[in-house]
Amino acid sequence: MKLLYEGKAKKIYEADNPNEVICEFKDSLTAFNGEKAASESGKGELNCAITTLIFKALEKEGIPTHLIKQIDSTKLLVKKVDIIPIEVVVRNIAAGSLSKRLGLKEGEKLPFTIVEFYYKNDDLNDPLINDDHAMILNLVNDRKELDILREYGRKINEFLTKFFDKIGLTLVDFKVEFGKDKDGHIILADEITPDSCRLWDKKTGKKMDKDLFRFDLGDIKEAYTEILKRLKEVK
Ligand code: UDP
């Protein structure tokens, strides 16, 4: 397989069909823009399974995704897209960079769900941007596309909040990325995993996401395995 691109958590390979690519989930873990790095054997497999389950559920809800099918334990066949270099972050509860920037206590429920845009650019440390910034950087064609990103972000949040609630998890915040397919349609791409979400156990309040790795709080493999187990039980 011809490797087209290697990122921090995934490798992208050429597929037989030029409109498709193969996405492999790696075991590597990074945080703080790559400053902290490690590897956890089996993490790629867990995240591949978790993303597949979530993307399939979102498709059923009418949210278009790049997923075509799972090929093996760490690989997905996906539609080839041009990634829009914007990280769409949706937040229900204060945590992470929001708490830091605005001085909000971690765990404080926000009066309403907020959506933020970050410019995907490692050299600049993925800065927070507004619509005007996205326009002057030509990250999208027009402002309507930014509205579509926000709308999809909110729709995904509404669905996932209920979905995770059913399995005893609070969805604190998450990041999603979108791409344009060959027809120019905006579809959900990348991943939705405990690497890209904050998930807290409702009973114990324990963190079950990448914050375990970011702040050396516990075993991510155990937490991700538990999330996958619970997701498989969702009716
Ligand atoms: N996030 C992500 N990738 C990034 C930045 C953030 O997946 O490059 C996720 C993160 O896991 C959390 C949410 O987006 O669920 C909000 O992250 P925040 O801005 O608080 O950033 P942090 O500094 O904590 O990564």
Image (cartoon, helix red, strand yellow):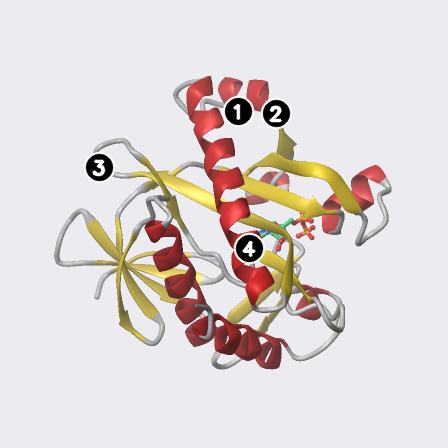
Tell whether label 2 touches label 3 (CB within 8 Å): no
Q: Are marks 4 and 2 in contact (CB under 8 Å)?
A: no
Q: Residue tagged by mark 4?
A: 162
> In whole angstroms, how far apart are the C-alphas of marks 3 and 2?
27 Å
* Secondary element at image label 2: loop
225 left or right of 68 in image = right
Spatial CA distance of label 3 from label 1 is 22 Å
- Kind of residue at badge 3: Lys
Q: Which mark is residue 54?
A: none
Badge 1, how many Cα within 10 Å: few under 14, some, many 20+?
Answer: many
Q: Are marks 1 and 2 in contact (CB under 8 Å)?
A: yes
* Residue 167 located left or right of residue 213: left
The N terminus is located in which quarter?
bottom left
Q: Which mark is residue 182?
A: 3
N-terminal of the pair, mark 3 or mark 1, is 1
Q: Which residue is mark 2?
A: 130
Secondary structure beneath label 4 = helix
Vertical order, 42 against 182 (above or below): below
Task: Judge depth for marks 3 and 4 and give the one in front.
Answer: 4
Residue receiving disc 1: 134
Measure how far apart labels 4 and 2 are at the Cα level: 28 Å
Q: Earlier in the sequence, mark 4 or mark 1?
A: 1
Badge nearest the viewer, 4 or 1: 4
Residue 7 percent across, percent down from the top left:
44, 57
Q: Specify the amino acid type for callout 2.
A: Asn
Beta carbon of the mark 1 residue lies under 8 A of ligand 1: no
Q: Are marks 3 and 4 in contact (CB under 8 Å)?
A: no
Which quadrant of the figure contains the C terminus? Answer: bottom left
Mark 3 / mark 4, whichever is N-terminal: 4
* C-alpha distance separating marks 1 and 2: 6 Å
